[in-house]
Each structure stands twice: as C-alpha cells, then as structure tokens.
Image (cartoon, rainbow, N blue to C red):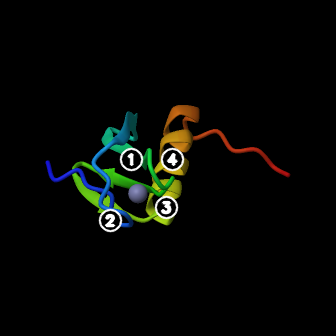
Amino acid sequence: MDAVCPVCRERDLVVIDLDVAHHALTLISCAACGAKWWRRDGDEVSITEVVSLVEEDARASRGRRRQRA
Ligand SMILES: [Zn+2]
C-alpha cells in the first residue's frame, strides 16, 4: 500500500484498524505532521462518512429501540 502522508510525504505513519458496521475502517495518522485521514475498505473517505458509519453501527448494536427525548 502506498502509505505516504499526503501533506508532508512522511512514511512513518500510525495505522489503527477498526471494525465498524462490518466495514474495515482504518485511521491513519502522520507521526511527523499530525495529519489524520480515514480509509474504509481500502478507499479514502471523509470524516463525515466515518461519522455516519459509526452512527449506523451504534444504531445496529442498539437494535430498533428508540428513545423519546
Ligand atoms: Zn505528514
């Protein structure tokens, strides 16, 4: 994999693999400049997509129960 920081071209990256809503979610953080980005199933995704995936996962694990505010 071409794991290179898009900001500073550093190759020393911190990679954290997560499993969310049955997707392989990866947080990649640059050790040099602190840039962070995400991949889902190998494709780069925005934080917005990550958040909606996490919400989907939380909803699935809670079942269909809904609370009234
Ligand atoms: Zn960097």
- Name the residue rendered at 50%, 57% in the picture: 52
Distance of label 4 from label 3 (alpha carbons): 10 Å
Ranked by sequence position, the earlier of labels 2 and 3 is: 2
Q: Which mark is residue 28?
A: 1
Q: Label 3 to label 1, Cα distance in Å? A: 12 Å
Q: Secondary structure at mark 2?
A: loop
User: Is residue 10 toward the left or the right of residue 60 in the image?
Assistant: left
Q: Which label lies toward us, 3 or 1?
A: 1
Q: CA distance from mark 1 to mark 4?
A: 17 Å
| Residue matched to label 2 | 6
Q: Amino acid at mark 1?
A: Ile
Q: Amino acid at mark 4?
A: Val
| Mark 2 close to ligand 1, CB under 8 Å | yes
Quick one: label 2 or label 1, which is nearer the N terminus? 2
What whole-number distance in Å separates the C-alpha atoms at marks 2 and 4? 25 Å
Q: Which residue is mark 3?
A: 47
Q: Residue at x 52, y 33 (%)?
A: 61
* Image marks 4 and 3: residues in contact by CB distance under 8 Å: no
How many other residues sit within 10 Å of disc 2, few (<14), some (14-19) or many (≥20)?
A: few
Nearest to viewer (mark 1 / mark 4): 1
Residue occupied by mark 4: 54
- Assess disc 4: are there few (<14), some (14-19) or many (≥20) residues with their C-alpha within 10 Å of its C-alpha: some
Q: Position of residue 29 (x, y in %)?
A: 43, 47
**Label located before the other in sequence (2 or 4):** 2
